[in-house]
Image (tube, helix red, strand yellow):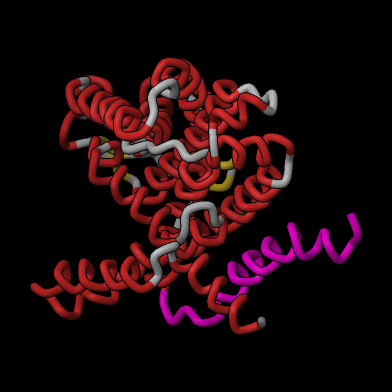
């Protein structure tokens, strides 16, 4: 592969995202904007993982917030109950989420269509119920406080620090996702998305590939959940609830299924837009719904793929 092709296909999008992370703070008038930026990158990290599963492998998940809940409660319970450092609990949560995804994915990924959607929905509801009922460990419906992230002698405080942590982690996750899509596994996932039967004819181990991307997607969600809990300093079972799963799916569809850049755009729209619409008070939810409907009506492939298609037609 030539240097120019490498830059076009892999490095340039990553460099552009890194530039956005670096340049954005120059326009932030207060710490509040750092908080919004951090939330965008945290949710975008989870959405990238879900997009790998839905947009590239064609597997629907309506319970992905369950993995965010596992990651969130790992950094909450680990330091309090076992005295483990938060950074170690973050990695432990990611490993636990990947293990659970491996165990759960083997049977449910044999399902297709709405059967798979309902099965993943059941998993998400199960995690939320466990987190709600196990009050001795999780604090029950009221949730629990989360100790601040400490790296050796440095305790992470302030929205600006979390902005850089979340932004850097998203760039790393973005690059890893791009590399995965350019790998033989990524090409196999594309084939599975188009036709599982044709993929099997080509000699692709469909079950193994789907399980692999499911585990990777769960790991992304777990890290994002841990970051969200550490950033907010408090966590409740709602972090693993059905509405959070639907929110993640909406971000994937809105930004564009099969678009890694679209994951960031979808997360940004659904995190920033409600903040902008707060000035309309009681009409906030109605306006948000209308705007999202408008995006889906006029940009049916998602924001990024639809705009890319327009530019492609204009260049021709």
User: Horizontally, is 282 left or right of 86 in the view?
Assistant: left
User: Horizontally, is 41 left or right of 134 in the view?
Assistant: right
- The quadrant the N terminus occupies is bottom right
Q: How many marks?
A: 0
Tell whether position 294 is magenta.
no
Q: What is the chief secondary structure element of the magenta stretch?
A: helix
Where residue 84 appears, as percent x and y from the top left, is: 49, 25
Tell whether position 13 is magenta.
yes
> Residue visible at 91% across and 59% down?
2
Quarter of the image for residue 255 reads bottom left
> Residue visible at 34% across and 54% down?
250
User: Visible in this render: residue 159?
Assistant: no
Q: Quick check: 313 above or below 261?
A: below
> Residue visible at 37% across and 70% down?
32
Quarter of the image for residue 66 reads top left
Where residue 135 appears, as percent x and y from the top left, is: 19, 23
Q: Quick check: 166 above or below 238?
A: below
> Residue visible at 39% across and 21% down?
108
User: Visible in this render: residue 145?
Assistant: yes
Q: Which residues are magenta?
A: 1-30
- The quadrant the C terminus occupies is bottom right
């Amino acid at each position: 592969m030539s240097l120019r092709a490498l830059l076009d296909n892999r490095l340039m999008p990553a460099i552009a995202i890194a530039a956005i992370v670096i340049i954005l703070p120059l326009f932030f008038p207060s710490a509040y904007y750092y908080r919004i930026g951090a939330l965008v990158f945290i949710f975008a990290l989870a959405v990238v993982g879900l997009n790998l599963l839905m947009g590239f492998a064609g597997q629907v998940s309506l319970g992905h917030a369950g993995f965010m809940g596992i990651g969130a409660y790992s950094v909450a319970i680990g330091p309090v109950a076992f005295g483990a450092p938060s950074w170690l609990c973050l990695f432990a949560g990611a490993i636990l989420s990947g293990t659970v995804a491996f165990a759960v994915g083997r049977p449910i990924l044999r399902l297709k269509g709405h059967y798979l959607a309902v099965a993943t929905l059941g998993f998400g509801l199960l995690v939320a119920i466990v987190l709600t009922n196990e009050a001795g460990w999780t604090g029950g419906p009221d949730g629990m406080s989360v100790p601040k992230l400490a790296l050796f002698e440095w305790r992470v405080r302030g929205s600006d620090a979390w902005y850089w942590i979340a932004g850097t982690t998203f760039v790393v996750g973005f690059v890893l996702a791009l590399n995965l899509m350019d790998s033989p596994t990524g090409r196999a996932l594309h084939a599975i998305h188009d036709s599982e039967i044709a993929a099997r004819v080509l000699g692709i181990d469909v079950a193994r590939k789907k399980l692999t991307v499911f585990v990777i997607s769960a790991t992304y969600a777990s890290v994002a959940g841990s970051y969200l809990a550490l950033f907010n300093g408090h966590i409740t079972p709602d972090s693993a609830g059905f509405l959070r799963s639907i929110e993640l799916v909406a971000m994937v569809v809105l930004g564009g299924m099969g678009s890694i850049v679209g994951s960031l755009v979808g997360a940004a729209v659904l995190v920033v837009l409600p903040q902008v619409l707060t000035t309309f008070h009681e009409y906030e939810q109605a306006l948000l719904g209308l705007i999202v409907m408008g995006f889906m009506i006029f940009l049916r492939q998602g924001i990024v793929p639809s705009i890319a298609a327009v530019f492609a037609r204009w260049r021709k």
